[in-house]
Image (cartoon, rainbow, N blue to C red):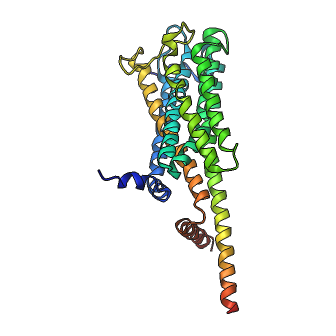
Amino acid sequence: MNFQFDNVSHMLNMDGHGAYVWTAVVVTVLLMTWLIINPLLQGRNVFKEIAREVSREQLRQDAVKEGT
Amino acid sequence: MNWNWFYRMGSPRWFYESTSRWLPWLAALTFVLLAGGLVWGLAFAPQDAKQGNSFRIIYLHVPASFLALAGYFLMATAGAIGLIWKMKLSYMVMKCAAPLGAVLTFLALFTGAVWGKPTWGSYWVWDARVTSMLILLFLYLGVLALQYAFDSKDVGNKASAILALVGTVNIPIIYKSVDWWFTLHQPATIRFTEAPSMHPDMFQPLLVMILGFYCFYAVALILSVRVEILARERKTSWVRERVKQATQNTLGAGL
């Protein structure tokens, strides 16, 4: 198993095919990253929403207790 | 026969809690496989004698296509289980598999297009394989859109499950298209029944990438199913308990 290119610029150029190969790589990596980041962000938002609901209910319960 | 395991598997809470434990490990494994396989394929696998370096796109194109097809099977199966046993979790899996599969199908088409330009001289051809993959993309988008086309969530789930099931007809057509029709697309590199038509030095990194994509699919799907579970089970006591604990922990860390 050997490194197939002479240097970094040779690897970027890939004998004229670099533009195709690297476009495919960049688009794939970006979209796959988005597939991971998106549910993580959404999950955080849902978590925060539920936390707000929970604390609001807690306040209401406390108020009821104080009232009695 | 004891069916307890089956019902337990249908419990969103069980799914959420058990995936919490092993998801980080699976994510780490996925990253190692994908990073390793990509560097191996892009820099260390030997050049193709006919296609030169453009063949390296295979390390993205084939795994993405594999998962686009396998993901469709999974989505349709989840839809069928939802229709038959009315399992909530199963519909959640179906719903989350649709956008994931659509992105992977798009990637298969996109990487195919940039591979097609230097190899066939054209980004796009209306070839049997390429066209049936485009239909797969539309099926995924259809399942996705049907979810939101009805006021009732239940009706939306049933409609998309039925579309997903009908669409499975397309899967063997895609798989066999390169054999049934005279196409520009090269025949399959990997077959279940024969040895791969590739030198081991090229084939090994491809295998690593396919394995990595399978793990990636599992991680991405589980992540979005977990969000779906949290959102739908927000009124249940176990979700509330979890949220309370988590907010207390962050508060404690903040203080």
Up the image or down, B190 lies above or below B246; here it is above
In front: B225, or A6? B225
Q: Position of residue A60 (x, y in %)?
A: 69, 80
For the point 54% across and 66% down, which residue is it? B242
Tally of numbered discs: 0
Answer left or right for B150 relative to B90.
right
How far across and down, in percent of the image, does residue B72 sit?
53, 33
Q: Nearest the camera: B181 or B36?
A: B181
Which quadrant holds residue B248?
bottom right
Rendered image quadrant of residue B7 = bottom left
Residue plotted at (62% across, 14% down): B116
What x and y, as percent, mark residue B250?
60, 68
| Residue farthest toward the bottom in the current orientation of the protein | A68
Residue occupying the point 64% across, 39% down: B144
> Residue A24, image x and y in percent?
62, 25
B243 or B161, which is in the foreground? Answer: B161
Q: Is residue A17 visible?
A: yes
Which residue is depicted at the point 61% across and 49% down?
B154
Residue toward you, A67 or B246: A67
Q: Quadrant of the C terminus of chain B?
A: bottom right
